[in-house]
Amino acid sequence: MNAPIRVLVVDDSAVVRQVMSEILSAAPGIEVVGTASDPIFAMAKMRRDWPDVITLDVEMPRMDGISFLRQLMAERPTPVIVCSTLTSRGAETTMQALAAGAVSIIAKPTLGLKGFLNDSAQELVAAVRAAARANLRALRAGAGAGGPRASARMASGSGAATGAATGAALARLGAATGTTPAAASPARAEAMAETTDRIIALGTSTGGTQALEAVLRGLPRTVPGIVVVQHMPEKFTAMFAQRLDQVCALEVLEAQDGQRVIPGRVLIAPGGRHMTLRRSGAQYLVEVRDGPPVNRHRPSVDVLFRSVARCAGRNALGVIMTGMGDDGARGLREMFDAGAQTIAQDEASSVVFGMPKEAIRLGAASRILALQSIGPALEQYARGA
């Protein structure tokens, strides 16, 4: 028999520690080896009995979760699932946690906590199982990747003050040592005004925030419009888009209903809502809608990919990247069948080789590429190759 996944629950809320321990202990193949109310107590317990996975609150007394996470990743990398509140402050802190090496996010509300955790039991168990299989080497490689054109937008900004402010934001993101300022992005040339009849669609989940940054940072503003589903709770995607917008030459936005898809622009599906592609004459638009979860996810990669297959067909490129489960695999197959070019990330560079593996199994991928090769492939596609 396989050894159980050993989990340490670190949270300053006694209710969270109790409910999460009960949920995880009841799941086959998972064992809760301890709980701790803050990182100081956690480190003392870990020295005696090191866990396979840690669930970590990010706002705790004595030592905050981000500092603990950075220390952990520097000394003994261990899969960490961040538990963060569904607030703007919680979203901002979670972006720092993901940059510091956290594998995934579990959101929790400020009210109705016990009921929420029980309702999210399946998601929590799946996240722990995925974290236990996570390739932390690939996670760190993705977080450290970035194209040489990441500073292209800053170079074309108006004035030294703009460049300095943006450079500081880049430094904060790269080192994960601060917060993203609330100020608007620095001045930049607008995305190309004309509409393209080509589309790039990206889908990703666990480990995807780092992977997406690694791909998008290297792309020029001349690439076709890009639509993205990254599995992430509501309120978190806006902050994620803002952080990417700071470090990319591309314009990166959380998608709004009816927004145009144009070259140089990346639209990220809002957490908690599905996003689909629609064609209106010569223009592509996105529709953002409520709806039931698909493959346990909202937004769902399958929902996006299927709409791209219908609306763009052979004029699209689909990419499925690191993530647990199989969301997007069937949609990518539909894109492939419609004549689109399709790419799946390879196992060695995936944090979790779930979604790409299923797409490959279905014969949905025309190419299987390492993370560092996906950006160049998108540039080649932009040149018409």
Image (spheres, helix red, strand yellow):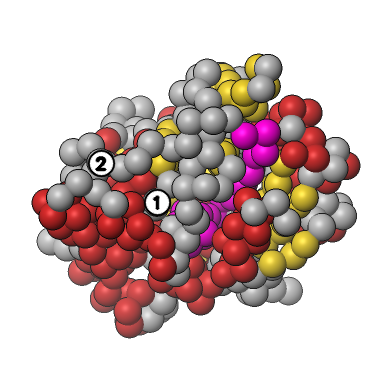
Taking the magenta stretch, the answer to whether it contains residue 202 is yes
Q: Which residue is pictured at 66% across the width and 22% down the height?
A: 282
- Please rate how many residues cluster around mark 2, counting C-alpha atoms within 10 Å: few if below 14, some from 14 to 19, many from 20: some
Quadrant in the picture for residue 379: bottom right
The residue lying toward the viewer, choosing from 300 and 264, is: 264
Q: In this view, does 74 lie above or below 329?
A: below
14 and 299: which one is in front?
A: 299
Q: Pinpoint residue 149: horizontal percent, then vertical percent.
A: 41, 62
Q: To which quarter of the image does residue 164 belong? A: bottom left
Is 72 part of what is drawn in magenta?
no
Q: How crowded is mark 1: few (under 14 residues within 10 Å), some or many (20 or more)?
A: many
Circle nearer the N terminus (1, 2): 2
Please state the horizontal and vertical placement of residue 304, each as a whole percent of the image: 66, 34
- Residue 21 x, y percent position in the rendering: 44, 52
Can residue 256 be seen here? The reply is yes
- Quarter where residue 61 is shown: bottom left
For image coordinates 41% across by 41% down, the residue present is 251
Over which residues does the magenta segment extend? 196-216
- In the figure, is residue 130 to the left or right of 270? right
Q: Name the residue under label 2.
A: 187
For mark 1, what is the residue?
Answer: 249
* Quarter the N terminus occupies: bottom right
* Label 1 secondary element: loop
Q: In this view, does 326 lie above or below 277?
A: below
Q: Is mark 2 on a helix, strand or loop?
A: loop
Quadrant where the C terminus sits is: bottom right
- Which residue is pictured at 48% across the width and 42% down the height? 264
Three-letter amino acid code of the residue under disc 1: Ala
Calculate the distance from the C-alpha at mark 1 to the C-alpha at mark 2. Answer: 11 Å
Do the CB atoms of the residues marked 1 and 2 lie less than 8 Å apart? no
